[in-house]
Amino acid sequence: MLAFIVTLRSGRRYTVQAEELRCTGCHLELVVAEPPASPNPRVVGLFDQNEVVAVVAREHLVSEEPSDVVPHAVSRVDPIPF
């Protein structure tokens, strides 16, 4: 099981514990396996793929480098629905 850090375009960050990350067209699914008697995995996190900026498995993150945060400016033609 891994801890996935999901960062959204809005700046919100979520840490979700799951066994697998799947891309299903327009969504990212974080899933865990059912007990051995059931072959179907369970979805424990569902994110709109257009809203996700980054996904990192915490166990594989070596370091987080300091940097200047660049604010996101929304223009009239920006496809982000704020």
Image (cartoon, rainbow, N blue to C red):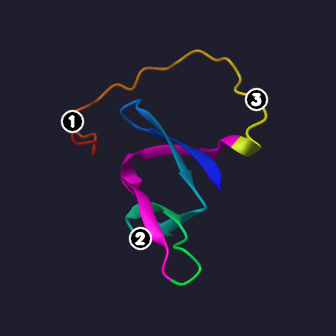
| Secondary element at tag 3 | loop
Q: Assess disc 1: are there few (<14), some (14-19) or many (≥20) residues with their C-alpha within 10 Å of its C-alpha.
A: few
Sequence order check, earlier mark of 2 and 3:
2
User: Mark 1 highlights which residue?
Assistant: 82
The quadrant in which the N terminus is found is bottom right
| Secondary element at tag 1 | loop
**Which is in the foreground here, disc 1 or disc 3?**
3
Residue 25: numbered disc:
2
Residue 10: numbered disc:
none
- Residue at 67% across, 41% down: 58
Q: Amino acid at mark 2?
A: Gly
* x then y, percent, for residue 20: 59, 63
- Residue at 37% across, 46% down: 51
Give the main secondary structure, helix, strand or loop, of the magenta stretch: strand
Q: Nearer the viewer, residue 59 or 64?
A: 59
- Residue at 73% across, 38% down: 61
| Secondary element at tag 2 | loop
Q: Is residue 65 above or below residue 53?
A: above
Q: Nearer the viewer, residue 73 or 56?
A: 56
Q: Amino acid at mark 3?
A: Ser
Q: Is residue 64 above or below residue 82?
A: above
53 in magenta: yes
* x then y, percent, for residue 10: 36, 33
Q: Position of 38 compared to 48: left or right?
A: right
User: Mark 3 highlights which residue?
Assistant: 63
**CA–CA distance in space, label 1 to label 3:** 31 Å
The quadrant in which the C terminus is found is top left
Residue span colored magenta: 40-58
* x then y, percent, for residue 28: 45, 60
